[in-house]
Amino acid sequence: MKKPVLYSEVAYGLGMVGLSLSVALMTRADFGVSMVVAPAYLLYMKINALWPTFTFGMAEYILQGALLVGTALAVKKLRPYFLFSFVTAVVYGFLLDGWMLLTNQLPADGFGLRVLWYVLGILLGAASISCFFKTYIAPEAYELLVKELALKLNAPTHRVKTVYDCVSCAVAILMSFAFFGFGRFEGVKLGTVICALVNGLLIGRFTAFMDRRFEYKDALPWRRYFS
């Protein structure tokens, strides 16, 4: 039986919308944001206290810009692909701020509801990252770095992702202590640790599921611009 086609451009759109929504849901659950966005969330909390118009989305694309510079230094090459990734980060930042406004209206006054938002967030995030790995359009800096490292090390993407997630979690803990005092965990909680441990596995499972169900094609002749 012929598989249905999932176009690269559609996968990119699904990844953008789904990932920004997943972060907003996990933030609403308040069990700790994902380890990848935890550094940006902590930066947002610190600066927002002094500058109320500073948003989570702004913190995201500022940190992603810095990460892209680090990626270029690591691979010893500045590719146009990296610049497109920053555009993705900016669009993602605006989407995230929009979802934050909407999800703040969700009820979260009970443990069961918070668990629901957390589980939906972590599953949606893993599925969205799997979509990013199936598109030629530049993903966020986080996913781009994982892809570049996996290629450079010739290692499975989901394993590199797990290592990267754990490193991000450790960095976020150090930032929490530096910003808010030793022993105080802001943004980094039990849910962050759980996410760091299982996110790579979930992404691998979602990717395998998508590979079985879909055939991937490009709808537009733009791939050469992202190489």
Image (cartoon, rainbow, N blue to C red):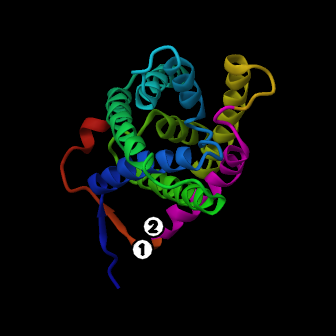
What is the crowding at mark 2: few (fewer than 14 residues within 10 Å), some, or many (at least 20)?
some
Q: Residue placed at 68% from the left, 48% from the top? A: 191
Q: Nearer the viewer, residue 60 or 149?
A: 60
Residue farthest toward the top in the current orientation of the protein: 50
Whether residue 203 is in magenta: the answer is yes
SS label for mark 2: helix
Label 1 belongs to which residue?
Answer: 213
Residue at x 33% of width, y 50% of height: 12
In the image, 62: left or right of 198?
Answer: left
- At horizontal 31% and vertical 74% (from top left) the residue drawn is 4
Q: Find disc 2 in the rendering and name its residue.
A: 210
- Residue, x 53% and y 47% (percent of image)? 28
Q: In the visual, does 90 lie left or right of 55?
A: left
x and y percentages locating residue 158 in the rendered image = 60, 51
What is the chief secondary structure element of the magenta stretch?
Answer: helix
Give the residue at the far left of this rendering.
220
> Which disc number belongs to residue 158?
none
The kind of residue on which mark 1 rests is Arg
- Residue range of the region highlighted in magenta in the rendering: 186-211
Q: Can residue 46 be seen in this view?
A: yes
